[in-house]
Structure formats: structure tokens, C-alpha cells
């Protein structure tokens, strides 16, 4: 494969490959563990609520839950990939090996982003493949499924790059995970439709970009959602562009990487 | 036609807030030189190297590697530079060979470079460890791997920032043999070290830094001439007070060990005569040539 890559592209390609191998070497932690966690959520919530809750007509609660859990895992893992790689290499000092190279800030960004997207998609695909063994899951609009999975993981991959550059210690990164990513994903409609919320909380949910990613992704399976998938796609796309712009600005200026 | 300098540094300053780490450095290092950058801790050596490597940005002034500006032409400049960082850092996910191939890959080198990577591995005595994960290596082996990483893309200019700090004699010999070979093949080597005897043996030219400035810049031979004559080191019996006639010749004193700076060997007899006259006894005596350490102490102490 590497012989097919031009010398110009070999730098970013190598960084991308290294980032892929980095998470693949610890795939129990980076792939198997999040798949297991998602399946436990599925087991418990479907057992408790399947006979009591029906969100969409003709869609059982367990089926409703699966796309949300898949997307939540995609987003969390895409974020974890870029953010943990950057904070680890910053704390351990090995980031210097990349900083000494001729790689441009754009190439750096794209390599980390692409590896995050791959990890998000791999985790999501694994959850999907295990879930459909037990539950019949329709696919109404595969294009939306792919678009939201891809854009969502890219958005969180870019956010992970920002967090990884900004954080100086693991403690700060844990704060990002626990006080931003977790609340936003749990309060995004993974486990419920926002129409079941009081009007105030419905309004608040519209400020949560995770809501659009989950809802749009779920629309791809059932053809039903809380909001138009085109609007969701636009919100996610614009959010991705904004975060990418911010990440690229940070990288170009050398913020916290080059003094 | 004049050859482009390997490194050119023009009026470079670097401030960290109120701290002026570099105060207008001018330095040119020619291609093929084996150059030493010496100075006490905090002199600004690592700051200067980090500026060359693009890890820091200068507050003012210009730095170039083989004619390429390290800021505006960073890709070309970094392509030509290999830096061995001072800190013993490593990536714990990969083995030695993988890390070296990745490092070469970042610089656009592909499978055609693998033979060179294998040569670096062998030359630095890492063959047995090529498939060992970086985190399982001993400190000395990690240092070798760090040097190998800087050489993985075969850069024409190599900067070694304290490469032998905490390293055993065997590695030093292996490493210097390989670095000297690279220098003979035309690579420019820039070295910072606390082991001044290494700089004296290896380097043809030396810059001494103190408090962000270059206080001496000359060939090693000229710097050694700076301290003329010989040195006489005498270990006196405890509690001896030197007679005024020879006290002025003392360059250093370490307890009862006195080092006299002599203009010529004939002065040894004068010192001995003064000691005999004062009825002082000594337990040891050595006649020494001035070395780079003496020059360093003299220059840095005076600046």
C-alpha cells in the first residue's frame, strides 16, 4: 500500500496509519470495551422499558434505543481517539517526534481527524452487527445513516483535537469527558424522544448538537425523527466546520504546542 | 562560490515574558562542521536548538537550515534537520523498528529508506532490540532509539542536545563512532554536552554561551591556546597557607588542592622553591595541559 502513496502524501499517511495502529493495539480498551458498554445499556434499558415505552408508532423501544446507543458510542470514541492520543503524547513528551517533522498543520489535523472517524465508525459498526443478531432493525435511509455517522465522528474528532491541544493534564481531559461529552450525549435523546420532555427542556435540547446527530442518525433507520434530517445535517455540518476552523487555528498558531 | 551555511542564526532573540532567554545571537555553522555549543544550565543552548527545530518561535531575528528559513520555509528546513531531544521521551505503543519507520515516513520516506533504518539500528547496537516495545527498553537503549529516530530520515544536519547525559561508556563509544562516520560522510553535527572532554576531542569549533549570549566562538585549537602554558596541580598538607609569592598564580582551589597557572615549565621550579622556603609539604603533584574545561570556566566565569 505504502508504495502507492506519493512522497508528498506519505507524511500525513504515516501519521494516520500510526494513529490507527495506536488504538488498534489496545482494541480491547478502544473497541471491545465501548461495544460491551453499549450492549449492557441495551440489555438493561430494553429489559426494563421495552413493554412500557413506545416512542414512535410501530417501533419497539429496544429498536428505538439501538441507533441512539450506536451514535453515542461513535461520538464518544471519535472524541476519545484524538483527545487521548494528543494528551498522552503531550504528557509523555513524544509529541515532539511529530512536531519536528515537515508535516503541515493541515496534514496533522487531517491525520488525527481521519483516525478518529475510523475508530468511531468501527465501534459503531461493531455495536450494530452485534445488536442486529438480537433485534430486527430497519434501514430506511442508508445515506443519512452514513452521513451522520461520518460527520458526527468527524465533529467529535475535531473537538477531541481541540481538547487534546488545550488540556495540559489528564485531569483536565477527564473534565472534558465527564462534564461536556457525557452530559451532552446523555441529554441528547439517546434514551428518549425530546417530545416527551417539558417545553423548556425541549427548547434547551435544540442547543445540544448531539441531539441533531442522534436524531438524524435515527431517522436513517426508521424514517421518523424529532426534527427534519436536512436541518440536523446542516447543524452538524456547520458545527463541524466551526470546530475544524478552531482546531486549525490552534494548530496553525502553535497554541500550547510551539512556544 | 561560497557554500550555503548548514546553520545561520542572525540577531535572534527569544523572550519568555520578562525573561530574555536569548539576547541577539549571531552564529554561522558551515556544512560538514562538527560544532559544539557549550554553556551552563540556563545559558540558552536548548532554547536555541528548539528555535532551529521549530519547537519555539523567535521573538526576533532569523534562523535558517541549509538556506531555508525555519519559520517561512519550515517544511524544507525540517526535512534537512535531525534533532535528538534532551529528554528521554518515547512512544509506548510501538517497537523500535516501527518507530523508526514511522519517523522516516513523517518525512516522506518510504520502503526505499528501510535499508538505512536497518543500518542505523545496527550501527547504534539496537539490532537485538529492534522488535522490542519502546517502554521495555532500558534507559541507555531508549537513548539509542532516540538518536536513531533523529537519523531515520538521513538528515544532512544533525543536532544532538546532551546525547550522552546518563549514558554508559559503551554507548558513548558506539554512538560517537557512528556520528563521526556520518560527519566524515559530510553530515554537519551540532552538539551540546556537559562532557567537555567529548567536545574537545570531537568538535572542530566551539561556541560558549552564558545568559543568552555567545561569550566565545572559535576553533577548539584557538580556544585551548587562550590559556597559555601549563597547569600545576599540587595537593598540600592540610591547613597549609600559601606564601604570597605564589598565591597570585593560583587559578583554582578545591580544599587543599591548588591549581597554578604557569607560563612555562620553568616556573615549576619557582613554585617548588617558594613552598620549600615556607617549609610547606605537599602529598601529590601533577603537571597538566590546559583543557576545554579550563577555557570554559575562564570564559563563562569572566563573562
Image (tube, coloured by chain):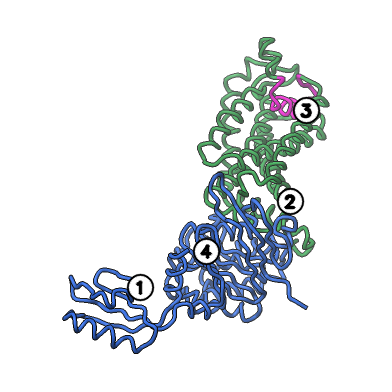
Chain colours: A green, B blue
Residue B154 appears anywhere in the view? no
- The residue where tag 1 is placed is B251
Mark 4 or 1: the one toward you: 1
**Which chain letter matches label 2?**
A
**In what quadrant of the picture does the N terminus of chain A appear?**
bottom right
Q: How many marks?
A: 4
Dot 1: what SS? strand
- The residue where tag 2 is placed is A107
**Which chain letter matches label 4?**
B
What is the spatial separation of the Cα atoms under label 3 and label 1, in whole angstroms?
Answer: 76 Å
**Which chain letter matches label 3?**
A
Dot 4: what SS? strand
Query: Is there CB contact under 8 Å for labels 3 and 2?
Result: no
For this orientation, the residue located farthest to the left is B279
- Which of marks 2 and 3 precedes in the sequence? 2
Residue shown at 64%/60% (left/top)? B52
The x, y position of residue A45, in whole percent, is: 59, 23
The x, y position of residue B100, in whole percent, is: 61, 64
Residue A71 appears anywhere in the view? yes
The x, y position of residue A94, in whole percent, is: 56, 54
Q: Which residues are magenta?
A: A206-226
Q: Nearer the viewer, residue B86 or A162?
A: B86
On the same chain, marks 3 and 1? The answer is: no
What is the spatial separation of the Cα atoms under label 2 and label 1, in whole angstroms?
Answer: 57 Å
Disc on res. B209: 4
- The residue where tag 3 is placed is A235
Amino acid at each position: 500500500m505504502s508504495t502507492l502513496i506519493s512522497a508528498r502524501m506519505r507524511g500525513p499517511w504515516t501519521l494516520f496509519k500510526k494513529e490507527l495502529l495506536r488504538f488498534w493495539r489496545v482494541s480491547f480498551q478502544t473497541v471491545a470495551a465501548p461495544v460491551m458498554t453499549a450492549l449492557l445499556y441495551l440489555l438493561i434499558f430494553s429489559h426494563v422499558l421495552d413493554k412500557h415505552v413506545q416512542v414512535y408508532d410501530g417501533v419497539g423501544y429496544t429498536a428505538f434505543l439501538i441507533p441512539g446507543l450506536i451514535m453515542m458510542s461513535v461520538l464518544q470514541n471519535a472524541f476519545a481517539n484524538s483527545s487521548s492520543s494528543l494528551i498522552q503524547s503531550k504528557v509523555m513528551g513524544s509529541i515532539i517526534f511529530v512536531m519536528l517533522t515537515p508535516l503541515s498543520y493541515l496534514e496533522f489535523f487531517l491525520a488525527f481527524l481521519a483516525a478518529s472517524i475510523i475508530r468511531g465508525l468501527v465501534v459503531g459498526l461493531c455495536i450494530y452487527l452485534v445488536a442486529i443478531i438480537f433485534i430486527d432493525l430497519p434501514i430506511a435511509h442508508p445515506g443519512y445513516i452514513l452521513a451522520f455517522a461520518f460527520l458526527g465522528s468527524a465533529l467529535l474528532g475535531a473537538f477531541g483535537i481541540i481538547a487534546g491541544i488545550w488540556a495540559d493534564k489528564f485531569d483536565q481531559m477527564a473534565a472534558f469527558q465527564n462534564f461536556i461529552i457525557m452530559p451532552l450525549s446523555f441529554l441528547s435523546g439517546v434514551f428518549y424522544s425530546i417530545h416527551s420532555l417539558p417545553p423548556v427542556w425541549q427548547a434547551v435540547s435544540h442547543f445540544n448538537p448531539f441531539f441533531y446527530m442522534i436524531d438524524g442518525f435515527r431517522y436513517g433507520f426508521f424514517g421518523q425523527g424529532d426534527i427534519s434530517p436536512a436541518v440536523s445535517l446542516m447543524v452538524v455540518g456547520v458545527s463541524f466546520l466551526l470546530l475544524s476552523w478552531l482546531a486549525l487555528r490552534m494548530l496553525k498558531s502553535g497554541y500550547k504546542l510551539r512556544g | 562560490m561560497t557554500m550555503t551555511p548548514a546553520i545561520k542564526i542572525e540577531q535572534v532573540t527569544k523572550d519568555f515574558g520578562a525573561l530574555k532567554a536569548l539576547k541577539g545571537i549571531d552564529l554561522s555553522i558551515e556544512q560538514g562542521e562538527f560544532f559544539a555549543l557549550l554553556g551552563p544550565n540556563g545559558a540558552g543552548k536548548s532554547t536555541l536548538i528548539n528555535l532551529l527545530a521549530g519547537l519555539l518561535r523567535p521573538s526576533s531575528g532569523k534562523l535558517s537550515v541549509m538556506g531555508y528559513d525555519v519559520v517561512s520555509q519550515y517544511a524544507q528546513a525540517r526535512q534537512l534537520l535531525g534533532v535528538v531531544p534532551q529528554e528521554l521521551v518515547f512512544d509506548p505503543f510501538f517497537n523500535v523498528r516501527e518507530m523508526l519507520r514511522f519517523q522516516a515516513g513523517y518525512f516522506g520516506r518510504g520502503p526505499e529508506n528501510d535499508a538505512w533504518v536497518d543500518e542505523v539500528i545496527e550501527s547504534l547496537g539496537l539490532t537485538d532490540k529492534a522488535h522490542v516495545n519502546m517502554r521495555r527498553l532500558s534507559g541507555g537503549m531508549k537513548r539509542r532509539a532516540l538518536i536513531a529516530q533523529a537519523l531515520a530520515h538521513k538528515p544532512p544536519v544533525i543536532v544532538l542536545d546532551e546525547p550522552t547525559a546518563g549514558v554508559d561508556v559503551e554507548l558513548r563509544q558506539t554512538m560517537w563512532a557512528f556520528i563521526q562516520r556520518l560527519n566524515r560522510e559530510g553530515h554537519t553535527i551540532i552538539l551540546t554536552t556537559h562532557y567537555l572532554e567529548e567536545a574537545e576531542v570531537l568538535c572542530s569549533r566551539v561556541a560558549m554561551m552564558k545568559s543568552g549570549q555567545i561569550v566565545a566562538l572559535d576553533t577548539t585549537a584557538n580556544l585551548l591556546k587562550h590559556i597559555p602554558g601549563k597547569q600545576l596541580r599540587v595537593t598540600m598538607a592540610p591547613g597549609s597557607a600559601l606564601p604570597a609569592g605564589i598565591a597570585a598564580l593560583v587559578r583554582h582551589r578545591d580544599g587543599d588542592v591548588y591549581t597554578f597557572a604557569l607560563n612555562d615549565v620553568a616556573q615549576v621550579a619557582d613554585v617548588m622553591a617558594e613552598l620549600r622556603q615556607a617549609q610547606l609539604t605537599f602529598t601529590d603533584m601533577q603537571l597538566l595541559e590546559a583543557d576545554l574545561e579550563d577555557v570554559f570556566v575562564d570564559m563563562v566565569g569572566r563573562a
